Image (tube, rainbow, N blue to C red):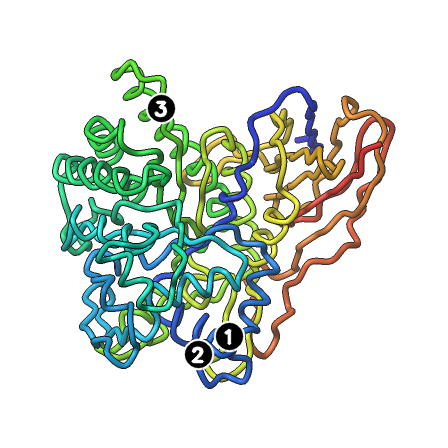
Amino acid sequence: MSMQAKLIVDKDFTIGEVDKRIYGSFIEHLGRAVYGGIYEPGHPSADEQGFRTDVLELIRGIDVPIVRYPGGNFVSGYNWEDGVGPVELRPRRLELAWRTIEPNLFGFGEFVDWCRKAGTEPMMAVNLGTRGPEEARQLLEYSNHPSGTYWSDLRVQHGYKAPHAIKTWCLGNEMDGPWQIGAKTAEEYGRIAAETAKVMKWVDPSIELVACGSSGLGMPTFPEWERTVLDLSYNEVDYISLHQYYGNRDKDTANFLAQSMGMDAFIGSVIATCDYIQAKKRSKKKVHLSFDEWNVWYHSNEADSRIEPWSIAPPQLEDVYNHEDALLVGSMLISILKRADRVKMACMAQLVNVIAPIMTETGGGAWKQTIYYPYMHTSIFGRGTVLVPLVESPKYDAKDYTDVPYLDAIAVHNAEAGEVTVFAVNRHLSESLPLSVDLRSFGSFRLIEHIVLESDDLKAANTKAAPNRVAPHTHGNAVVDGGGLSASLGKASWNVIRVKLG
C-alpha cells in the first residue's frame, strides 16, 4: 500500500457558505455546566453577576456564535417562569431528567446577560414535554415583544426594558426518547410542533424554529420519525435537529476514528428525508439541518451511575477527553463542514464541565480539554466558503466501516481574509502520511502556518495537574510547492494548514 495522499480543491467548485452558527455550543442545567461552570458567585474571577470571567475568556477564545439553552432533557420538565424575577422568590424544584434539585438561581435573564458577555447569541428551547403552545408563546412574548402586554411588561418589570430579540428557538428536545419527560410518538410530536410553531410565528414572524429529529442515528424511530414529523410541520419549521455521540468502549481506536463516516451517512439520510417531504409537498422551501448535539461521550457513564440523587449540581457527565477523542472531534467538524450547504447550525454538547471542551474546578482554575483545540481552530479559521474536496488516500477496514480513508480533510476559502485553510486528520495510528494539496486555481500564495495537534500517547489527557499535556504546536512541516502544498502529517494527528493568497 502506497502511503501517499492527495487533496485537490478548486476555488470555483464550492459546497456552500459556512454559516458561523455551526460552531455553536450548548449549556444545560445539568451537572456543573451552570453552577460551578459558567456561574459561580464568590469565585475569585466572578463578576458582579456571578459569571466566571476565567471561563468567559476561554469561551471567547473559541468565538462561539450561538449557545443552546436550557436543555436538553432538562427542558422537558422545566417551567421557565421559575427562572425569572427576583432570585430570592424563585422556587427550588425536583429536577427529574437528571434527578437533582434545581435552585433556579440562574435563569432566562441571567442566561441572556451571560450570552452578551460571552459574545454569543442565545438559542432557546421551549418545553414540549409537560407543556405546549400556550407556554411557548408566553415565553416568546416575554422575550421578544417590545412592551404593553402582560408578559412583555413583566420582562420590563424584571429589569429588561429592551426586548431580548432571540431569533432561534428549538421546539422541545429528543421527544422520541423514552427517557424524555412527556415523550411522544412522531404523530403526537409533529402536531404539537406545528401548532406551537404557528402561534410562535404569529407572535414574532422573524424567528427561526428547529423541530426535533430523532435522538440519535441508532434510534429505532429513525428516519421514519423525521418523515412523519416533517410531513406534519414542514410549512411551519425551518430546521430539523440531529443528535449523535460516539465512544470507544471497545478500545478499538481504528474503528473509533472511522465513526465520522457514520456521521456523514446520518447527515445524508436526514437531507434525503427533508428533500423527500419537500418533493411530496411540491414546496419551494428547503428545510435545513441543526446538528445541535454532537460530541464524544462515554468516559463518565460508570461514574454517573453512582451519583446520589437530589443533590445540587453534582459532577455529572464529566468526561476527561484524551488525544484520540480530539481526533474524532476534528473529523466530526470536517463532516459538518462537508455539508455546509445544508447544516446551518450545530452545537457541540456541551460547553463547560459536562462533556465539554472546558473544565473547571469549583472555587479553583479552568483549563482546556484536548477537544477544545479542533473546535477552536475550525471556529476561528473555518469561516468562508467550503470547497469540494477531491481526496485520494490509502484506506483501511475497521470493525464497523470499510474503505476508511486515512486522510480526512476539507478546505475553506475565506475570500475576505484572502486565505485558504486545510483541516486534515491522519487516522493512521503508527505511520505519518505524506500529503500533497493542489491549490493551483488560486494562483500564487504563501504559507502562514501549519498547526499540529499530536501525541505519542492516544490516551493522554489534559487535567488540572497537567493542563497542557496535549496542546497544539506550529512546527508543522508544510511547504509551498509550485501550485500546491506538501506536508507529512504525523501519525494520529490533527492538522491546520493556512495559506495567504496573492
Q: Is residue 336 left or right of residue 449?
A: left
The image quarter in which residue 188 lies: top left
Contact? badges 1 and 2 (CB < 8 Å): yes
Asked if 206 appears above or below 373 in the picture, the reply is above
Residue 95 percent across, percent down from the top left = 21, 69
| Residue found at x 38% / y 63% | 160
| Residue found at x 73% / y 43% | 497
Residue type beneath disc 2: Glu
Farthest-out residue, front: 148
Could you tell me which quadrant the N terminus lies in? Answer: top right
Tag 1 residue: 52
- Residue 272 is labelled as 3
- Cα separation, mark 1 vs mark 3, equals 43 Å
Q: Which label's residue is closer to the chain start, 1 or 3?
A: 1
Q: Which label's residue is closer to the chain start, 1 or 2?
A: 2
Q: Nearer the viewer, residue 50 or 23?
A: 50
Q: Is residue 138 left or right of residue 13?
A: left
- Secondary structure state at the residue bearing disc 1: loop
Q: Is residue 411 left or right of residue 72?
A: right
